């Protein structure tokens, strides 16, 4: 048989044989050869077009900007290369358990473009479920597929007959299905299935690239948001923002409520949320892990400086905190720790300066009073104005802790000679001492005794008042009045004996005032009746003889005195105070 090198040679040979009126056998062989070559050339052209389409698709993927545009291009090329009436692509909805229409090309039915297939339903649902390609030349009559009214209605409205579907796979996971379909019966060749599968692989790559780009973009956005928030919080701290400012900023960034607690679980600030009890167990867990932890309705992050617990942050209203926001919340705890440490450094520096001022004021007030006044003024304290001087004492409580508890009451507070000393601009030292004793006892959970003196103005007077406040604390303790607060003026004749500023008239008025006022208003002399009654050793018979009245009259007068001074006025301790006041009244 003559060898034919090219298609054109075969055609020329066939024409020569026809011209020479060759035998039928030779002519048939030449015709067969020419047709075979023509089919081969057509296959080469088709393969070249397919490869061009695949290269173009790969080029589109390399320039991926809009994944929807790439998917539309793939679906269109599938329709063009396979010469079908319609091509389309569906994607799986894992949560809904369905596959839905994403892209169509050549479709004319709105119902078809909106159809959703359950896993295993129809041809596409079976492909999505099994991860295998399926083809049919007549879908409506093919009993391999589970037919449903919505799917069959959509296919019938679109007029589809022959359908080919191949899976979009990423590893072992099917993410969708790519289809080619005709409106007339058609047998699908293996080459066509392979081509559509190649295009489906490209579509899967496009979707995966888009997912990765979205993840990278979201991650970068989260990083930028976290960095911006960190910079904003750090700048807030460095510009002098306090804990409430930081709490408000964190609440705004995380779109929730924030509560800040210190290491003793005392609330320091709260923004956009109702009060929250300290979540002790969650704080311990966050401290142990170094990460934010969640309970049923809040997130908690420990504020740490190394292993030291400085406090905690509680986030409310965000039960679904994502990874990015969780890292942001943890960054907020770092910034809060920075603020706590800055406050501690400032407090320590101020305490040192104030402690030195207090020590100089109380130990050498006369050495350079002007310099002391100037130093105090730089701290916002006017030593020339009247101040009460108080000393707080409590067994079992660290003095530094007690001083911190006192700091919110005082213009100046510090530890001097192992005692916590306070300077307070208050005109009533005794009443203030009683109030502080009650409140400080509640704060530290142990009895706090407070002695007071003053008001006093100027370094030397303040130092003298401090000495008197110290005597007052010792007297309160000796009298068994631990946990109470008073000034020496409140301690009766003992206060007058121990105090530096004896006020006899004030003592008489404090002790006998109600009776003196009654006598003045009524023109009576109950003071004389009291003095006589005590002089007679509380003997009614002797008292009535000296007073020259009936015994019942004495009893009535004593009842009136009880109404004015209280039923305990004859108690030994109280009676001693009253008798001393009566003697002083007689002298004055």
Image: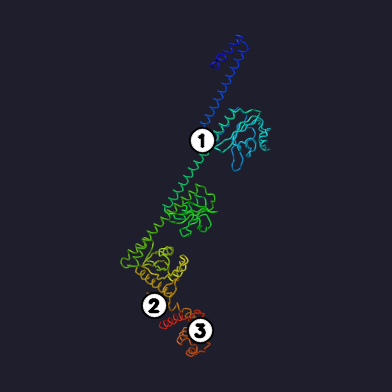
Residue visible at 46% across and 48% down in the picture = 229
Q: How far from the left and from the top, in percent, is residue 584?
A: 41, 81
Give the mark nearer the N terminus: 1 vs 2.
Answer: 1
Q: Which mark is residue 348?
A: none
For residue 4, above or below residue 281: above
- Within 10 Å of disc 3 (Cα), the crowding (few <14, some 14-19, many 20+) is some
Which coloring applies here?
A: rainbow
In the rendered image, which residue does mark 1 sit on?
A: 65
Give residue 72's quadrant in the image.
top right
Closer to the N terminus: mark 3 or mark 1? 1
Residue 557 position within the rendered picture, expressed as x and y whole percent measured from the top left: 51, 84
* Tag 2 residue: 497
Q: Residue at x 49, y 45 (%)?
A: 222
Q: Nearer the viewer, mark 3 or mark 1?
A: 1
Q: Nearer the viewer, mark 1 or mark 2?
A: 1
Q: Which residue is mark 3?
A: 558
Secondary-structure class at tag 1? loop
Between 419 and 423, the one nearer to me in the picture: 419
Q: Quadrant of the N terminus?
A: top right
Q: Does 457 sit left or right of 198 as displayed?
A: left
């Amino acid at each position: 048989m003559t060898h034919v090198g090219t298609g054109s040679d075969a055609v020329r040979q066939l024409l020569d044989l026809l011209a020479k009126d060759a035998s039928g056998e030779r002519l048939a062989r030449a015709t067969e050869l020419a047709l075979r070559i023509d089919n081969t050339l057509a296959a080469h052209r088709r393969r070249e077009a397919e490869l061009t389409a695949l290269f173009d698709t790969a080029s589109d993927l390399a320039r991926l900007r809009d994944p929807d545009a790439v998917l539309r291009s793939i679906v269109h090329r599938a329709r063009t290369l396979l010469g079908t009436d319609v091509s389309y692509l569906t994607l799986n909805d894992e949560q809904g358990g369905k596959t839905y229409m994403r892209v169509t090309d050549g479709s004319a039915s709105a119902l078809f473009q909106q159809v959703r297939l359950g896993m295993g339903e129809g041809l596409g649902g079976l492909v999505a479920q099994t991860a295998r390609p399926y083809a049919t030349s007549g879908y409506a009559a093919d009993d391999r597929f589970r037919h449903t009214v919505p799917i069959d209605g959509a296919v019938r409205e679109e007029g589809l007959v022959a359908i080919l579907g191949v899976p979009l796979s990423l590893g072992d996971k099917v993410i969708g299905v790519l289809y080619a379909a005709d409106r007339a019966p058609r047998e699908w060749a293996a080459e066509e299935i392979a081509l559509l599968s190649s295009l489906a692989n490209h579509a899967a790559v496009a979707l995966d690239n888009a997912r990765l780009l979205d993840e990278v973009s979201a991650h970068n956005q989260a990083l930028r948001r976290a960095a911006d928030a960190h910079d904003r919080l750090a700048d807030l701290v460095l510009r002098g923002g306090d804990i409430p400012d930081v709490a408000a900023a964190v609440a705004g960034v995380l779109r929730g409520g924030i509560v800040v607690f210190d290491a003793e679980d005392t609330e320091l600030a709260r923004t956009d949320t109702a009060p929250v009890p300290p979540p002790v167990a969650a704080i311990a867990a966050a401290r142990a892990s170094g990460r934010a932890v969640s309970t049923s309705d809040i997130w908690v992050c420990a504020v740490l400086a190394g292993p030291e617990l400085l406090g905690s942050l509680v986030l409310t209203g965000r039960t679904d905190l994502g990874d990015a926001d969780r890292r942001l919340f943890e960054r907020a705890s770092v910034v809060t720790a920075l603020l706590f440490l800055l406050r501690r450094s400032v407090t320590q520096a101020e305490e040192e300066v104030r402690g030195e001022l207090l020590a100089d004021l109380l130990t050498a007030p006369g050495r350079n009073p002007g310099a002391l006044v100037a130093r105090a003024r730089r701290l916002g304290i006017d030593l020339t104005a009247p101040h009460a001087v108080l000393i707080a004492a409590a067994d079992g409580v660290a003095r530094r802790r007690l001083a911190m508890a006192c700091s919110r009451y005082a213009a100046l507070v510090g530890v001097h000679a192992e005692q916590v000393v306070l300077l307070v601009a208050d005109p009533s030292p005794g009443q203030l001492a009683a109030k502080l004793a009650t409140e400080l006892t509640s704060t530290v959970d142990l009895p706090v005794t407070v002695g007071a003196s003053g008001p006093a103005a100027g370094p030397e007077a303040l130092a003298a008042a401090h000495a008197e406040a110290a005597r007052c604390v010792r007297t309160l303790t000796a009298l068994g009045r631990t946990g109470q607060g008073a000034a020496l003026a409140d301690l009766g004749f003992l206060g007058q004996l121990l105090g530096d500023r004896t006020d006899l008239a004030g003592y008489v008025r404090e002790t006998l005032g109600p009776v003196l006022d009654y006598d003045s208003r009524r023109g009576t002399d109950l003071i004389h009746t009291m003095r006589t009654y005590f002089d007679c050793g509380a003997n009614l018979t002797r008292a009535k003889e000296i007073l020259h009245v009936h015994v019942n009259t004495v009893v009535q007068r004593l009842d009136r005195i009880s109404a004015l001074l209280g039923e305990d006025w004859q108690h030994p301790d109280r009676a001693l105070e009253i008798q001393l006041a009566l003697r002083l009244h007689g002298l004055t």
